[in-house]
Structures are given as C-alpha cells and as structure tokens.
C-alpha cells in the first residue's frame, strides 16, 4: 500500500496537466476592459461583467457550484472561447481503508450528507451513472463544458470499478461518498477518503478531536508582517460566504511567511506579495480565505469573495484560480478492526491495563503524513513574480523544480507518539500540534475522558461528554474473498 502511494506521488508532477481556468474567467476580458474597470468605485460593486459564469454567479447571487449555460455575449469584448482542459484527480497514498487523493482545482467535493440532513434537494448528477460513466475512460474521454460540474467522488467510484457491493461507503449519500472532509471548488490538494463506513466515521471523529493536521500554502497580496502570526477571530457562516463575527465559532489560523515577491504594474508601480503557509486549529468554512483578507488585510490572489472585484479580475490575468493549496495532511491510521478512536472504557480512563499496556498500544498506532506538491498552474503563476531576496529565489527554484517547499519534504509513515512528534509534527505542523496536542493514549480514550484530563479545557465544540456516541457505529467491510 505504501509503495503504491509513492508511485502515484512520483508521477504527480510529470503527468499532471495544468488547470487552465474557466473560459469565462476574467482573464478572457479584452485589454480595454481592465482600463474601464479602473473607473469604477473603490468597492468594485458597479462592474459590468456580462454573463460570464464565475463572475456572474458572484455578482448576481448564484452559486459558484452552479453551471452557467447562458450564451456568451461577444459584443462586450469577450475573448474567443478556449478548449476546456480537464485535470483529473490522482492517488497520493492508499492505506487499508483510507485514501489520500489529490483534488485538482475545479472539482467539487459533495456535501450530500449535510444537504440531506437539512432537507435540501440533491443534484441529480451526483450519481456517476447520470453522466453515463461506466468506466474511467468514459469520464476521461467526456467533453466537459465550461463550468460544468465535476464531482471528485465520480473519479473515486470509477477507480474502484463502480463496485458498490465491495465498496458500499463510496456510493452512500449519507456518508458523503466516503469523503471525510471538503475543499472549496478552486482549492487543490489533499483529500481524505474512507473506503469503509467505519474508517470514515473514525476519521471524522479524528477531525472533531483535532487529531488531523493540515498545512496550506497561499499567495497573498501585500507584505504580510510580522512574518509569523496567529489570527484568532470567530467566523460565522452566511450561506455560501462567511464573516468575522464575535457570535460565530472560534477559528484560529497560524500564518507564516515563506518569502516576499514583487510584480510590476502597467502604470510603472510595483505590487507586493507574500507566499505563506497556514496551519488551522479548527477548519471552518473559508477560514483561511477570510482570515487572510479581513483578519490581516492580505487577501489571497484571485480570491473572488473577500477582495475587491477589480483586483480579482486583474489577478486572474496571471493566476487563473484562487492561490490556495492543501499541501500536507497528517492523520492517525484508522484502518481495520483494532484501530478505533475512543475505544476504551471511561471507567478506567481508556481501559488501559497499566502503563505497559498503554505504551504497547501507542507503539502499535501508525501515523501518516502525505504531501501534495503545488500544481503546475500555481507554479506557473509564481513565475510571474520576482523574489526580493536570495531566500525567496532559492524557494522559488525548489518549487519550480519539484513543487515542494523543501527538498526534504516527503510522505512520512511512523509508529508511536514519539516518532510522530519528531518526524511529522515538528516538520510540518509545529503550531497546530502545540495548540491541539495529542498525548500518548489519547486516541483510545473517549472524548469526555480526554477533556477531563489535567490541563485540558473543554471549550466550545468539544462535545457533550457522551462516550457512547463515540463508539463505532459501523462494522468493518466484509471482503469478497479472504486475503
């Protein structure tokens, strides 16, 4: 399994095409359109953007998940339609019951489980068969229209031969087709998938306990200072957007600047940019995008919700998507019958038979960290910039060559808490592992017992202390044939 994941990753940079953006993206505006946009007000609210899919959905209240099939207006300076290049997902790593998938930009992570609970109608195209896909080649050869929906679970199902009998969880709307979490449509990078209902439920519990670490890379406007800072601002969801509000849920983002860059403007001036990593402690909707924009005043390049419209239009002339990438994910192994979060008895603080037994269980717990290199279109966008110092030049060269932030970054698979802290947390997640520590034996303790331990504060969102709710609700998948 580990070798298979490495082979997938090794071919990622070589075989992956670049996302070319939507044919209705702002980069298709004629040159004089940009000049006209400069005459608009500072808020960019009066831009006449025609009927283009992405922009129309933003300014006329539609969903960015929607498909815009209105005819193009060629009388307002629209460029010639381009051929649609589709970049397909790829496998980064495969465990026994868990996958790490590379989601390209423009692919949608379904929210079928949430939609069903809230009584919303599901998209009829959620089912792979609705598109007529019977095998992977059918989807690869399909001619997708501009902004036509592409669900990542289609690829996952087709990779498993549409075998609903062997992999029922990948077809279950209530389990969101196995997806353990979601990324925004234009965000690329790592996505965790549970092949079984048990594995997904256990991984979801790991998310709730903050056992899953995530590291993002973004390119932001301006010179972000100080170079390392934490944004601790509550977020409140408002439909498809969010806002900073004291009544919202707590959200913490740790921003670290990797390098500063500049880019010349047509008027002779120079724009400044900061390439940053972001660690998140909670993972709210649009957390990084909103914290960067409203929290520290440095909106992400090509951001379409939380920055001025005319700035976004200019951004998309050289960066055709939001510059946000899920670079690394760290998580515990939850595959198999014995890998159960909160499996212990609350009466015995985890059901441990003494320190020796706890150490033995800890030594048998495997931890993983998977890396997804920056995509070709993000690397191409960085080529538009000039580093301000030697450190930035060295980083840019490394990213250009291998897509990684450091030559030593690679997938890590270790056993036990000590190895995890040294080889995963210290390397990739130093801040989030400090604010959300995982001590030896924590993964086997019910959440209420873990929260009552010395030095732990229950806080908002820690759960109600019902240990029965944390026990596995599903049985492991029965394989068709003995291994």
Image: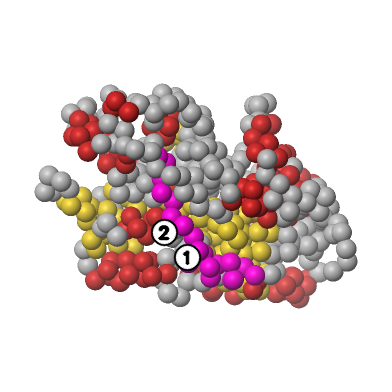
Q: Which mark is residue 376?
A: 2
295 or 232: which is nearer to us? 295
Pick the quarter of the image with the N terminus. Answer: bottom right
Residue drawn 78% across and 72% down? Answer: 357
Residue 425 versus residue 204 in the image, above or below:
below
Q: Which mark is residue 382?
A: none
Magenta-highlighted residues:
4-23
| Scheme of image coloration | secondary structure
Pick the quarter of the image with the C terminus. Answer: bottom right
> Badge 1: how crowded within 10 Å, few (<14), some, or many (20+)?
some
Q: Is residue 86 left or right of residue 33?
A: right
Residue drawn 70% across and 74% down? Answer: 363
- The x, y position of residue 349, in whole percent, is 75, 59
Residue drawn 78% across and 51% down? Answer: 163
**Disc 2, SS:** helix
250 or 410: which is nearer to us? 410
Task: Give me the C-alpha separation between circle 1 and circle 2.
Answer: 8 Å
Q: Is residue 185 left or right of residue 101?
A: left
């Amino acid at each position: 399994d580990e070798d298979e994941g490495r082979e997938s990753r090794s071919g990622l940079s070589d075989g992956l095409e670049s996302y070319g953006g939507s044919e209705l993206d702002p980069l298709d505006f004629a040159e004089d359109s940009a000049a006209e946009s400069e005459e608009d007000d500072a808020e960019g609210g009066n831009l006449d953007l025609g009927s283009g899919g992405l922009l129309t959905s933003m300014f006329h209240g539609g969903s960015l998940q929607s498909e815009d099939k209105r005819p193009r207006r060629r009388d307002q300076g629209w460029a010639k339609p381009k051929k649609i290049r589709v970049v397909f997902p790829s496998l980064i790593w495969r465990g026994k019951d868990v996958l790490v998938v590379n989601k390209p930009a423009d692919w949608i992570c379904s929210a079928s489980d949430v939609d069903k609970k809230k009584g919303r109608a599901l998209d009829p195209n959620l089912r792979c068969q609705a598109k007529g896909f019977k095998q992977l080649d059918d989807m690869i050869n399909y001619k997708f229209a501009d902004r036509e929906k592409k669900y990542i679970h289609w690829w996952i199902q087709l990779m498993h031969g549409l075998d609903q009998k062997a992999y029922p969880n990948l077809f279950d709307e209530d389990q969101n087709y196995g997806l353990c979490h979601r990324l925004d449509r234009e965000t690329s990078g790592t996505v965790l998938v549970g092949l079984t209902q048990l594995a997904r439920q256990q991984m979801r519990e790991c998310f709730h306990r903050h056992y899953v670490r995530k590291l993002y890379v973004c390119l932001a406007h301006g010179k972000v200072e100080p170079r390392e800072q934490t944004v601790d601002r509550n977020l409140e969801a408002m439909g498809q957007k969010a806002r900073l509000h004291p009544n919202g849920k707590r959200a913490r983002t740790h921003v670290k600047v990797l390098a500063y860059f500049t880019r010349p403007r047509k008027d002779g001036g120079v724009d400044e940019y900061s390439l940053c990593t972001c660690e998140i402690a909670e993972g709210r909707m649009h957390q990084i995008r909103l914290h960067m924009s409203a929290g520290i005043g440095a909106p992400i390049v090509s951001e379409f919700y939380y920055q001025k419209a005319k700035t976004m239009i200019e951004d998309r002339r050289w960066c055709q998507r939001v510059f946000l990438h899920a670079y690394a994910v760290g998580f515990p192994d939850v595959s198999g019958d014995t890998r159960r979060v909160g499996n212990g008895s609350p009466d015995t603080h985890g059901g441990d038979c003494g320190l020796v037994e706890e150490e033995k269980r800890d030594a048998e717990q495997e931890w993983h960290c998977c890396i997804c290199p920056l995509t070709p279109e993000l690397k191409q966008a960085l080529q538009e910039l000039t580093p301000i110092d030697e450190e930035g030049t060295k980083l840019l060269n490394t990213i250009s060559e291998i897509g990684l932030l450091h030559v030593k970054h690679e997938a890590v698979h270790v056993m036990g808490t000590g190895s995890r802290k040294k080889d995963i947390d210290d390397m990739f997640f130093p801040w989030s592992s400090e604010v959300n520590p995982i001590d030896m034996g924590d993964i086997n303790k019910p959440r209420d017992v873990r929260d009552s331990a010395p030095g732990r504060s229950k806080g908002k969102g820690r759960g109600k202390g019902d240990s029965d709710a944390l026990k596995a609700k599903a049985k492991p998948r029965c394989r068709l044939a003995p291994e």
